[in-house]
Amino acid sequence: MGGLCSTLDYTVGQRVKSWRLERGYTQKDLAEKIGITRQVVLQYEKGTRRISIEKLYAIAEALSVSITDLIPIQRVSKSCLEDEREEILNLARNDKKTNDQELRKIFYLLTKSAQLSEKSSRKAERVEIAKNLVKAGISVDIVSKTIGLSANECIKEKTGSIYYKIGKKIKEWRLVPQEDLAKKIGITRHKISKYEQGRTAIPLDKLYDIAEALSISIIDLLPESTENEVENELPSLIEEYKKIENQELRYALIKTLFKGIRICEEKVRKAERIKVAKDLVKEGISIDIIVQTIGLSFGEF
């Protein structure tokens, strides 16, 4: 049963490997204890072969651990990037030059990428909701307490975001009207305007198009650093991606990161709006104000 397996398979496989090494067993030792081949143990640990529950119990017994030591207590949830993560992991597995250590690194980078995307989207949504509530006349103290942001975050303009800074760089490099740039890359002038204001997440491929249209490198459009704690992780994450030797893998990883931020804005942010709306109801905020500022209908929360 080789082929495409899930993140859960890989996670369980890595736990099996960790406990096997802890016990000082080779793959061959473990294989003999549970009546399978060393090759199958290798596939288990790489996550390319799913381990049956029956076999998991056998492995747990052979390693003198509980089955709960080999599986996550909580189900590995499907993140915004699950499909892309599986595609990249399988691409790495099929690359003969990718060893176990590099595969673990790629898995770590993908996990970090998903966490960064979701964390960034949740924070961005809360900041936007907070500012709208303050504009609607709700006390900054109440908004801060309910949403979990500092008073300053509730009222300041969002000029530290990665997309705001990219947008600012686009505007600095653009020596032609927005309409001319828009025509060159096949989008509307309104979209360019939103990019430059940092109001819309820019897909990585579109950023390459903009750089090409402006006759510059994409590096010229990427900010060196950001003030935001979440987004400070982005440059260092990209630097880690650059260390991946396989060019196809490297591009896929960077593309996944930027795509993830964009997808999470759609999936995570609505869930965050619903959560905040429920918290605001508990604080006694008017339903009408919640509906107007958060953009949900009453039935959605």
Image: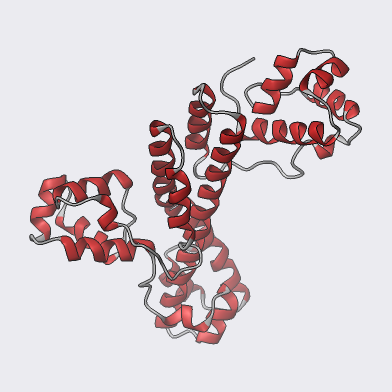
In the depicted structure, whether residue 271 falls above or below residue 42: below
Q: Position of residue 95 (x, y in %)?
A: 49, 23
Q: Residue at position x 81%, y 26% from top?
A: 56
Q: Is residue 58 left or right of residue 132?
A: right
- Using the rendered view, name the quadrant where residue 67 is placed: top right
Would residue 12 be seen by someone viewing this image from the given angle?
Answer: yes
Q: Residue at position x 14%, y 60% from top?
A: 174
Number of marks in the rendered image: 0
In the picture, which quadrant includes the N terminus? top right
Q: Residue at position x 91%, y 32% from top?
A: 64
In the depicted structure, whether residue 30 falls above or below residue 178: above
Q: Residue at position x 57%, y 33% from top?
A: 103
Q: Is residue 162 left or right of residue 25?
A: left
Q: Position of residue 36 (x, y in %)?
A: 79, 13
Q: Position of residue 124 (x, y in %)?
A: 45, 65
In the picture, which quadrant includes the C terminus? bottom right
Q: How is the image coloured?
A: secondary structure
Camera-side residue: 241 or 65? 241
Would residue 299 be seen by someone viewing this image from the given angle?
Answer: no
Q: Position of residue 58 (x, y in %)?
A: 86, 23
Camera-side residue: 271 or 87? 87
